[in-house]
Image (cartoon, grey):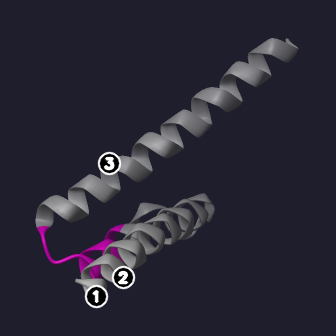
Amino acid sequence: RMTTKMKEKFDKYWTFCNILMAIASILNPRIKLSLTNFVFSKTFSQIEEIEDHMTLVRNIMQDLHNNYVAKIEGFN
C-alpha cells in the first residue's frame, strides 16, 4: 500500500519533469519533436501513454505560441 502511494507520487512528479524536458528539447532547433518522441517511446510502454504525452506537449507548445502571438499583436 505504501509503495503504491510512493509510485503514484513519483509518477506525478516525473511526468512533470518529462514535460519540462520535452519543451526544452523542442525549443532546440536541432532536436525539435524527434527526441521527445524517442524518449517517450522508451519511457512509456503503452502507445496510448506516448500519444497522450505527445498531445499534452503539443498543446502546451501551442498555448505558448498563442500567448506569444497575442503579446506581439498587443505591441503593434
Q: Distance between the residues labelled 1 and 3?
A: 29 Å
Label 3: which residue?
Answer: 55
Furthest residue toward right: 75
Q: Is residue 66 magenta?
A: no
With 59 as the anchor, is 65 left or right in this view?
Answer: right
Question: What residue is drawn where x is 43% and y is 52%?
Answer: 57
Question: What residue is drawn where x is 41% and y is 46%?
Answer: 58
Give the magenta range: 37-46
Q: What residue type is labelled 1?
A: Thr
Label 1: which residue?
Answer: 3
Q: What residue type is labelled 3?
A: Thr
The secondary element bearing badge 1 is classed as helix
- Give the number of the disc on residue 6: 2
CB under 8 Å between callouts 1 and 3? no
CB under 8 Å between callouts 2 and 3? no
Pick the front one: 33 or 24 = 24
Q: What residue type is labelled 2?
A: Met
Q: How many marks?
A: 3
